[in-house]
Amino acid sequence: MEAFVQGWGLTVAFCLLITIVFVAAMAHLARELRWVRMLTDHLGAELVAPQGKHGKGDLQLEAIRDEAIAIATARDPAWAQKQVRSWQMRAQRLEHALSFWTDFLRQLGLLGTVFGLGMSLFYTGKDVSKLLGPLAFKVWTTVAGLLYSIILQALFGMKLPAWVDACEKNIEAWDARRRGARASSSSEAS
């Protein structure tokens, strides 16, 4: 066990854990960004050509279309507003998700270094001079955490806020048009 802790074993294990978290973060952010882009594009197309055919899409786009139709034709305005608000909240959470994942990766890297250092101290006793060798291995977990957080920021840091802002604007415009159409149809019915 001492060789595992003071050698490359623990460092590689922590780096693998950090890599798995990075892959999960990439998958999560890519999936949510894809949803935001689809919603933004669909609502933008609806604003330009209401009730028009916007081409075939995949199942996620079909679900967005179905939900938009259900909201537009809802008899219960409170339910419709709740659904629109859920779109807004999901889009807004995306920026916070990026911050969470980047911070989490950095913290995992630091945890790997500190944990490895603590375990090495446990095995070497109070002799600090014996810590320099294991510390050189453990620093790589911090490097991995920082590197992966930088990659996430580079890939999503600029385009994610732009798409979230565009999505929020399209939701607001689409919802205002929907409420205006609903108000005009209620006044015509009276």
Image (cartoon, rainbow, N blue to C red):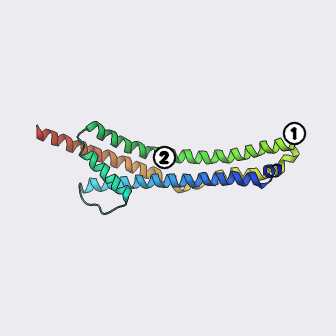
- Residue 166 position in % (x across, y down): 38, 51
Q: Is residue 46 left or right of residue 126?
A: left
Farthest residue, direction front: 1
Q: Residues within 10 Å of mark 2 (few under 14, many from 20)?
A: some
Q: Amino acid at mark 2?
A: Glu
**SS at mark 2 in the image:** helix
Q: Quadrant of residue 103?
A: top right
Q: Amino acid at mark 1?
A: Lys
Instruction: Kindly identify which numbered label has been placed on residue 95.
Output: 2
- Residue 172 position in % (x across, y down): 32, 44
- Residue 47 position in % (x across, y down): 27, 53
Instruction: Kindly identify which numbered label has been placed on residue 91.
Output: none
Residue wearing tag 1: 126
Look at 26% across and 56% down and name the residue there.
48
Look at 68% across and 53% down and name the residue there.
15
CA distance separating discs 2 and 1: 45 Å
Q: Is residue 33 left or right of residue 155?
A: left
Look at 25% across and 43% down and name the residue there.
74
Look at 30% across and 38% down and name the residue there.
79
**SS at mark 1 in the image:** loop
> N-terminal of the two: label 2 or label 1?
2
Q: Is residue 104 left or right of residue 9?
A: left
Q: Residues within 10 Å of mark 1 (few under 14, many from 20)?
A: few
Farthest residue, direction bottom: 55
Q: Is residue 180 left or right of residue 84?
A: left
Is label 2 in contact with label 1 (beta carbons under 8 Å)?
no
Q: Is residue 113 above or below residue 77?
A: below
- Residue 45 position in % (x across, y down): 30, 56
Q: Quadrant of residue 125?
A: top right
Q: Is residue 26 above or below residue 113?
A: below
